[in-house]
Amino acid sequence: MQDITQRKEYQTKLENALAKNSEQQKQLAQDNKIINQFALFVKLDKKGIITDLSQAIVNLSGYSRDELINRHWSSFCKESPQTIKALHHDILTLREGWSTSI
């Protein structure tokens, strides 16, 4: 007869780790949902096209997600073209990234 004690212990540890990972994934999904609802987040490509954004931005803007995605961010601004051009240049040339808060 072969002793399978070690194999059973390993299997139990693996099952526990998988269960813990599953719980962490659920918590992460819940956290992401909360962040998406309340954090103002817009992701732009190098040309200034909106590629992703949070639901909070959608709610605040009054536009639908489909109306915002794949549009240039400046098309939703009321600033002058000169101000937009300067801001766009500043954002793209920052090495440490750009962030703001309202």
Image (cartoon, rainbow, N blue to C red):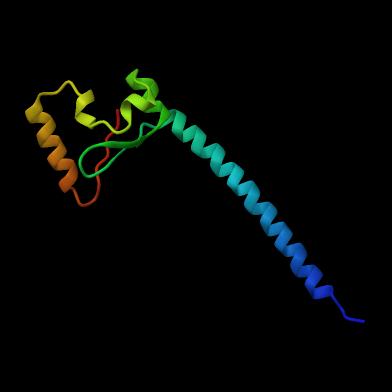
Q: Is residue 44 above or below residue 80?
A: below
Residue 70 figure quarter = top left
The x and y percentages for residue 61 are 32, 21
Q: How many marks?
A: 0
- Which residue is the extreme one toward the top? 62
In depth, the one of 102 and 6 nearer the eye is 6
The x and y percentages for residue 59 are 39, 21
- Residue at x 26%, y 43% (from the top left corner): 45
Q: Quadrant of the C terminus?
A: top left
Q: Quadrant of the N terminus?
A: bottom right
The x and y percentages for residue 88 are 16, 37
Residue 100 figure quarter = top left
- Residue at x 10%, y 34% (from the top left corner): 85
Instruction: Please give left or right for residue 63 compared with residue 90 in the image.
Output: right
Residue 52 figure quarter = top left
- Residue at x 18%, y 45% (from the top left corner): 92
The x and y percentages for residue 48 are 22, 38
Q: Is residue 47 above or below residue 74?
A: below
